[in-house]
Image (tube, grey):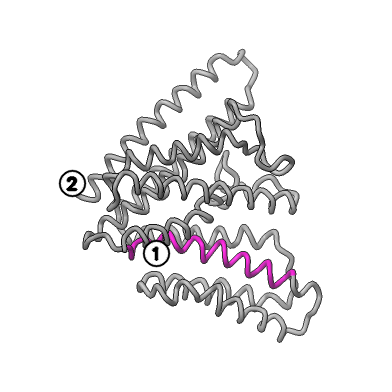
Amino acid sequence: MGTNTNILLLFFGVFAILVVLTAMGEALRSRVPHGKTNHDVESFLIRVHSWWVMVILFTITALLGPVALMMLFLFEILAALREFLTFTYKNKADHLSLALGFFLILPLQYLFVGLGWTGLFTVFIPVYAFLLLPIISALRGSPDRFLTRVAETQWGLMICVYCISHVPALLNAQTNGDSGQTVLLIVFFVMVVQIGDLADYFAGRRFGHRRIAPGLSPKTLEGMATGIAASALAGVLLTWITPFGAAESAALAALASLSGMMGGLVFAAIKRDRGVKDWSHLIPGHGGLLDRLDSVIFAAPVFYHVQLLLSA
């Protein structure tokens, strides 16, 4: 089957799941006494409605092909970097560094990804950008909290630009000459990570007891185990859209899910440190873009490099 046919089949499968979830939410809402609202039910429905929009948008983009996917992730990188830098410390001496980050480093990183220059794309930000930005800030002559300012800007570029750029970099993956397979590989990655997140969220609140990091996150050992298992199962069921076997797909999905969950803990720690619940209110019921991408950010480099090893 062609790439677009596979994407549509996946969409209709997710469509059916969302229909069921929407019906469940409306059924729960109908049981609430007239004139009253149940916060949990309303929150659930808002999340499901947001998922409808995100799934349709992602499906349309995937059907349009690699260029559209590149543009989608470029928008996500810009929005994520803006959200993150909103909560960092900076002064006038950092304006040039921030401008270079948005208008030079980010476009160059994306250019290297688009051209398939793997060697340069993997070292450009963690080596050359990390050396350049402190120099620019130092030349501005302000020592006030210098290390904090530089480190926070570097960290923003690392997670919001460098890590996320590994997703469109999958378009350059080796898939036995089938260019359409690379689009499906991105679809596979996004689906297994998000399925793991959802299973972790619901299982953790349903029967989770042992918290991984008490005082930091409600994430539980039971929820994480369920999420990883759900991702592995999804990996097996989605093997047909990957160049790997069932065992490899399951292992790759489980590893990506675990990496993503650890990313969620890191972002929870950052938000606690900054005293905020969500990065923004861009997505109703989900918070900001970073609230939805925290798992993807940490999982993307791991998934990218492991699939390279499996394809070698």
Q: Residue at x 55, y 30 (%)?
A: 203
Q: Point out residue 211 in the picture as x, y percentages from the top left corner.
A: 66, 37
Within 10 angstroms of label 2, few (less than 14), some, or many (20 or more) residues? few
The amino acid sitting under disc 1 is: Ala
**Helix or strand or loop: what does disc 2 sit on?**
loop
From which residue to which does the magenta span run? 148-173
> Is 172 contained in the magenta span?
yes
**Residue occupied by mark 1:** 169
Q: In the picture shown, does residue 273 fall above or below 312?
A: above
**Residue at 47% over, 71% down:** 122
Q: Which of the 4 quarters of the picture holds residue 128?
A: bottom right
Discs 2, 1 touching: Cβ within 8 Å: no
Q: Quadrant of residue 181?
A: bottom left
For numbered disc 1, what is the local secondary structure? helix
Q: Earlier in the sequence, mark 2 or mark 1?
A: 2
Which residue position holds label 2?
1
Please give the name of the residue rendered at 69% of the width and 73% of the height, measured from the top-left corner. 150
